[in-house]
Every structure is written in C-alpha cells, then in structure tokens.
Image: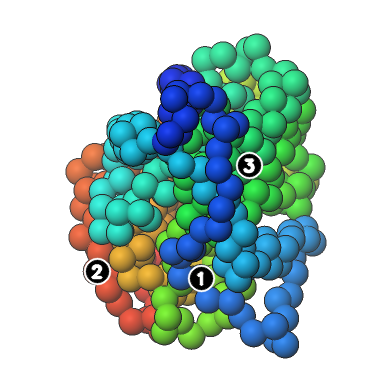
Amino acid sequence: MMSLSFCSLIAKPCSMINGSNRKPCCGRTRFGVIIRSEVNVAPKQRGIPQLSKQGVPLAVQEVVHRQSQIINHCSKPRPLFEPTFLYDAYEMCRNICAEYAKTFYLGTLLMTEERQKAIWAIYVWCRRTDELVDGPNAGYMSSSVLDRWEDRLHDIFNGQPYDMLDAALTDTVSKFPLDIKPFKDMIQGMRMDTRKARYNNFQELYLYCYYVAGTVGLMTVPIMGIAQESVIPVQSVYDAALYLGVGNQLTNILRDVGEDALRGRVYLPQDELAQFGLCDKDVFSRNVSERWRKFMKYQITRARFYFNRAEEGVSQLQKASRWPVWSSLILYRKILDAIEDNDYDNLTKRAYVGRAKKFLTLPLAYTRSLSNHKTKFRSLTRPI
C-alpha cells in the first residue's frame, strides 16, 4: 500500500539503440561512464554506523558504500540509445510525473535537465512497481509476477531494458551512482503486501515503511546531490532521506485507514491498538471514539518525529534539488494537519490537501530551499 498507485502504464518495447538497426537492447556496447552526480563520500576512517531504529536494522551503510564505489570506479556500462528514442522515453516519464504528482513535478523544474529526467524515470518505475499490487490488475497478482519484475530490474541495470520506460531508467543508472539494492527492496515491500495484512508491532511496520517508501530516499539522494558545503556526514543525509520516506508512508497509512479497512488491511501496530483499548473490530466498525482519537494523536506525533528528523538532511542537498523535497515534506505535514482538522476521523473521511493549498506550499518550500543549512523550521509543525 503506497501513495503511488494509479492507472496502468503501457510502454513500447525497447528496440532502438543507436546503430543497431532496431535490434533488441541486448546488442548494447559496454564502456565506462562519467558520473555526473555530486555525492560526497565520508572519510573511510570515520566509518558509517548501521542504521537501526526501533530495533530494526537496515543496511543503509551497504547502499552508501556501494554507491560510493560506483562513483570511484565508474564501472557501469552505458548503452547507446538512439537520441530520439531516449528523448521520447524521458518525455513519457515527464508526462506521467506531471499528471500524477503535480506539486512534486513543479519542484523538479529547478533541477538541472539530467537530474530532472533521472527523478522522473525513478518516479515512474516506483509507480509501476506499486501498480503490480494496488493497480486494476492486482487481482491477478502472484509471486511469479514480482519475480519476473525483479528479473526485468536486473535487465535494466545490465543495460537490457524491455520497453521505453525501462530504457529511461537504464540510461539513468548509467549516469548516476545508483545501486540496485533499494530497488530490489521496494519489490520486497510489494511481496509483503501480498502476504501480510497485519503488523504486530511498530518494528514490523517500520520495516515495511522502509521497503515501500524509505527506499525511494536511498534511490534519489545520488540524483539530488549533496551540497559541497554540507556540514554533516553523507550517512546522515541518507538517514534523513530514509526518515522522510518513512514519515511519508506513515502519513499515507494514517490517511488511508478507512480505505485499507475496506480491503481487509490494517496497517497499524496491533500491540499499540491494544494499549489504547482498541482492536481490528474498532477499525472495521468505523467508530471514531475518544480512544481512537488518543491513538491517532500518538500515531501523528510519531510521523511528525520522522519529518523533523528529515529536515537536517534536506538542507544538505544541492540547493537546486531542495525545492521538490521541501514541497513533499510540507505537503505531507499538511495531510497530518488535515486528519486533526477532521477530528481524527480517518475511518469515514479521507484527509486531503486541496489544490489551492498544494500550490501555496510551493513558495514556502522554495523559501526553505534557499535557507541556511543550520536553520531549523519547527514552526512548520503544529504544537502537540
């Protein structure tokens, strides 16, 4: 259950590589690639501690290490697509992002052209991945479908895209230091969605949030780039990106409690429900009791905690990349505000931020993106 579900995406098979007479993509040429991202690598002697929150170890260290190795060795092959084919592939990604993530899309327009295209390509792959589980054909979902999708992911990273949208991501991974692990982890999150409809505690839920949303942060940090003047270790920036993803997913869960219940899913920690004298029956009965309100206040406080932790890392990104990230952070905080404005009724109502309010976040986010690295903005969070 992600925020990235939408109508089916169909792309043309990929067969247009430069000089190939429209032969399949497997006829690519391998050669070195100049990496254009600006990720600063933490000094080796300092080390990068493994991230562990709420008892759930996550190998962010592994991703940072691998992606830094890609920078150092420039080892990725770069397939030669025909320019018009590649242009059309990225245009498809741009159009999808503009249609389904309008506020975020506008924020990407300040980025350099290459970063724009890379973010659009990653965004589309994530949406297509989510579509397998939550789309109109989800009823035909099986483990073999996700296995085949993972095989396609390996093909993308090996320079053998299946269709135009895959080709855009293939081109992106050849230009930026992207490791395959966060992408594979997201697919693992989809597997969890097919097997699991309850979460015993927050440790389990946190892991799920990492798989389906925290991974997006790990994918995009190399694209966004870290500012040369950054004052914190690179690991801290990755941690902050993970926190933002987890905060976003926790917000999605709180917003969609009623809708998920209609599908028999409860993405709320079972032990915490019990602590507040609640259970699944209270969710399915759609009864907004005083116990429920207290429970929701607790859950909203946690989501805000992760947004607060994400702020420091956002301020360390390349200045031109901060706007869309701040837009996302502010917008998701407003969703939490909307749940409160609905008197914590997320069982019969869906909290949303209207179009006017969404566009009003843009200038605020832009102002934040220009601010000093050390500035804190706790005023963005409502008093608890």
Residue at image mark 1:
39
Judging by the rendered image, the residue that carries numbered circle 3 is 158
Q: Position of residue 113 (x, y in %)?
A: 30, 54
Callouts 1 and 3 close, C-beta under 8 Å: no
- Label 1 to label 3: alpha-carbon separation: 22 Å
- Circle 3: element type: loop
Q: How many marks?
A: 3
State the separation of the CA atoms marked 2 and 1.
24 Å
Please state the horizontal and vertical placement of residue 43, each as a whole percent of the image: 64, 85
Q: Quadrant of the N terminus?
A: top right
Q: Is residue 6 left or right of residue 209?
A: left
The vertical placement of 366 against 23, above or below, is below
Between the residue at mark 3 and the residue at mark 2, the CA separation in whole angstroms equals 40 Å
Q: Nearer the viewer, mark 3 or mark 2?
A: 3
Residue 103 placed where, x, y %? 29, 46
Q: Residue at x 62, y 59 (%)?
A: 75
Q: Quadrant of residue 257?
A: top right
> Quick one: 146 or 211, which is closer to the camera?
146
Give the secondary structure at mark 1: loop
| Nearer-N-terminus badge (2/1) | 1
Q: Quadrant of residue 193?
A: top right
Point out the frontmost of discs 2 and 1.
1
**Amino acid type for the residue under numbered disc 3:** Asn
238 relative to 346, above or below: below
Observer able to see residue 287: no
Q: In the rendered structure, which disc, 1 or 3, sits on the residue that comes first in sequence?
A: 1
**Which residue is the site of mark 2?**
367
Colour basis? rainbow
Residue at left 31%, top 45%? 105
